[in-house]
Image (tube, rainbow, N blue to C red):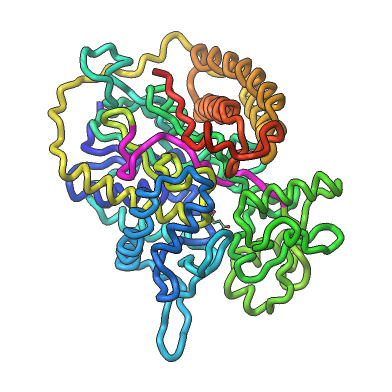
Amino acid sequence: MKQYDFVVIGSGIAGLTFALKAAKHGSVAVITKRKGADSNTAWAQGGVACVTSDEDSFELHVRDTMEAGAGLCDEQVVRTVVTEGPARIRELVELGLQFDEREIAGHREPDLGREGGHSKRRVLHVQDVTGAEIERTLLRELARSPRVELLENHMAVDLITSGKLGFATEDRCLGVYVLDEVSTEVETIRTDRLVLATGGCGKVYLYTTNPHIATGDGVAMAWRAGATIANMEFIQFHPTCLFHAEARSFLISEAVRGEGGILRNERGEDFMAEYHPQGSLAPRDIVARAIDAEIKRSGARCVYLDITHRSEEFLRERFPHIYETCRRFGFDMAKQPIPVVPAAHYQCGGIRTDVNGTTTMPGLYAIGEVASTGLHGANRLASNSLLEGLVVAHRLAELLARQPLPPREFVLPEWEPGDVQNVDELVVIYHNWDEIRRIMWDYVGIVRTDKRLQRASARLRNLQREIREFYWNFKITVDLLELRNLATVAALIVDSALSRKESRGLHYTLDYPEAEDRHFRRDTLLSRK
Ligand code: SIN
């Protein structure tokens, strides 16, 4: 049994920030499914929303966040994240991260990007590869920290809790079972401070802007352990994912619209003007729904993002990654509109926490996309999530540093593999995986109805039964664990959506098309206990 003072699962902005800070107070393990840099953070293009300009204010950032959140943001959490953001950004800069700047009247200042729902330019960025640069900076720092062990190619199987072990104490998290993907052995890791920073669950949908790793592992494990899960019906669909058969997950950043990009239908019309006064820069839920409606109305397979009025020189400089990727797929964004469709992008709900990352289960913490702090409410404001990851990771590290470590009194049992065989029919795993993603896309997407949700629910229950059987009878693999987690998270999304009999933020249902404040201006909370 390995033991650490802190165990972090996930290596995106929140996990790495926490690990670096916690290492000042004890030993840390960072467990990650693939390589350190394989995270949602590394794919973030837009940047970090933060008040840094004299023309902006905390009040405006708070207001924009709350407006996007459609009545479900926790104002105290919003204020904390917004006002503590600048200090966290300064720390990143001290670690060597260089956000883009521009020269104004002889002095240099941040080159701030604009995105949907923001009343001001406030998005700090490094060209269109902000997340990758943040990830590189944090990993470089981590490599210098002798107290942090980075366990790559290790996948968490399940949390170990005193309740599951039948210990006569309050139910708390005591550690985690982890599959070493190289040796294929399951290790037992003991800690009193287990931090889930596993990101989101975009892979639960057929089309997503997320990397392959985004399989909802943290929410699924926390759910099985008995922690409270909040607001899983609020899945954000990004309006502009490149439409090309071989470019399934490629995001075209909202910053392109921030720089003047216009959405057009197949007739070349600027259709967003009909849907919202802010046109193509309306909040994401509105833009995604409008595109969905246009596509359904016209029978077209996509809409188009037109930024051809900006020069090739500007586009190459500001969006080098997007420019080159589009070119690789045969589109010159300086000369022709880019074909785009909406795709699942961000999980606004997650494991219920406070603004310090504390969950409802002692010993278990959650930070980053996997957590539901109350910042995003029913719809996340673009580029608020990297900021949240930084602020909440910092607060959790500070909180835990103030608390003495409990005595390590528990010895945990080794993983019991049972009498299992190797998976003989991999096709079952791949089939179920595809089926879940298709069900979610068709029945639990941008526009929902009770009937579609009920269909999804019934099919998912069957799949979950089959997957459970597989899990108990066969030797576990990463694919099987991810499938099990996907199925759990899909069911949580459907159950949450079914319980919200209104439309709000990202949850839009034809059966109840209006918001119903009297009964539903509240979080959806699910717990196994
Ligand atoms: C984007 O660049 O459009 C994504 C930004 C975000 O999701 O916050």
The reply, left or right, for residue 277 in relation to residue 396 is: right
**Which quarter holds ligand 1?**
bottom right
Q: Residue at x 56, y 26 (%)?
A: 499
Magenta residues (range): 341-359
Q: Residue at x 44, y 70 (%)?
A: 56
Q: Residue at x 67, y 62 (%)?
A: 277
The answer, for residue 483, to whether it is visible in the render is no
The reply, left or right, for residue 206 in relation to residue 477 is: right
Residue 106 part of the magenta segment: no
Query: 468 above or below 128?
Result: above
Query: 357 above or below 271?
Result: above
Where residue 9 appears, x then y in whole percent? Answer: 37, 38
Query: 421 above or below 149?
Result: above
Residue 357 part of the magenta segment: yes
Where residue 420 appears, x then y in whole percent? Answer: 48, 12
Where residue 27 appears, x then y in whole percent? Answer: 21, 42
Residue 507 quadrant: top right
Q: Residue at x 84, y 46 (%)?
A: 297
